[in-house]
């Protein structure tokens, strides 16, 4: 699923389940980083293949880069995001621009490996255990439509959970809600 929002659904759910220990922004950074591979192949060869980063070893590289480089990049992006918000928007949409190393690591790890898992179900050319095995055990284990609906469901539950968490946070600070 290159360049689609479907991959972000599990990340939203992860953030709502463990908000202090999961960085959604680093998760999203890892999603973008891993999809540079099929985008690059498409631009240069016309074929969006997934030979290197869409493997367990490739995901390990994406995880490390996302954890180490993604953290400062995402903290900067959060500062920019917060600066764009009006005070009314900031009540609901602003996030602390400090990402702990643990939250960055978990977001990067889940991002890299969930991406490979999701694409292993969908794309025939994804070989998650290459170069050790050409087997793709998850290929079409469920239909693409079901996979996409599961990602949408995860995203919907995640957003709902984040809204509830924000409402509770505002209530704890004694702020009124719209």
Image: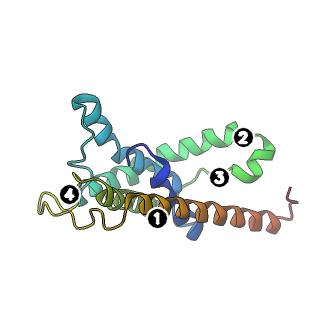
In which quadrant will I find the C terminus?
A: bottom right
Q: Earlier in the sequence, mark 3 or mark 4?
A: 3
| Residue pointed to by mark 1 | 102
| Residue pointed to by mark 2 | 85
- For the residues labelled 2 and 1, the Cα–Cα distance comes to 27 Å
Residue 80, quarter of the rendered image: top right
| Residue pointed to by mark 4 | 127
- For the residues labelled 2 and 4, the Cα–Cα distance comes to 42 Å
Disc 3, SS? loop
Residue 2, quarter of the rendered image: top left
**Badge 3: how crowded within 10 Å, few (<14), some, or many (20+)?**
few
Would you say 85 lies left or right of 111 here? right
Tell me if residue 178 comes above or below residue 75 in the rendering: below
Where is residue 50 shown, x and y percent of the image? 25, 47
Residue 163, quarter of the rendered image: bottom right
| Residue pointed to by mark 3 | 95
Q: Nearer the viewer, mark 1 or mark 3?
A: 3
Disc 4, SS? loop
Q: Nearer the viewer, mark 2 or mark 4?
A: 4
């Amino acid at each position: 699923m290159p360049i689609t929002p479907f991959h972000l659904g599990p990340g939203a759910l992860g953030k709502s389940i463990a908000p202090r220990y999961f960085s959604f922004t680093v998760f999203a950074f890892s999603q973008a980083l891993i999809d540079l591979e099929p985008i690059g192949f498409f631009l240069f060869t016309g074929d969006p293949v997934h030979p290197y980063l869409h493997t367990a070893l490739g995901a390990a590289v994406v995880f490390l880069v996302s954890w180490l480089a993604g953290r400062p990049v995402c903290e900067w992006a959060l500062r920019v995001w917060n600066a764009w918000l009006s005070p009314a928007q900031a009540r609901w949409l602003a996030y602390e621009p400090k990402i702990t190393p643990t939250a960055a690591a978990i977001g990067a790890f889940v991002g890299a490996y969930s991406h490979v898992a999701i694409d292993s179900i969908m794309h025939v050319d994804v070989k998650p255990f290459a170069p050790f095995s050409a087997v793709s055990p998850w290929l079409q284990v469920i239909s693409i439509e079901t996979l996409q609906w599961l990602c949408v469901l995860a995203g919907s539950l995640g957003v709902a959970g984040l809204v509830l968490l924000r409402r509770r946070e505002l209530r704890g600070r004694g702020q009124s809600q719209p």
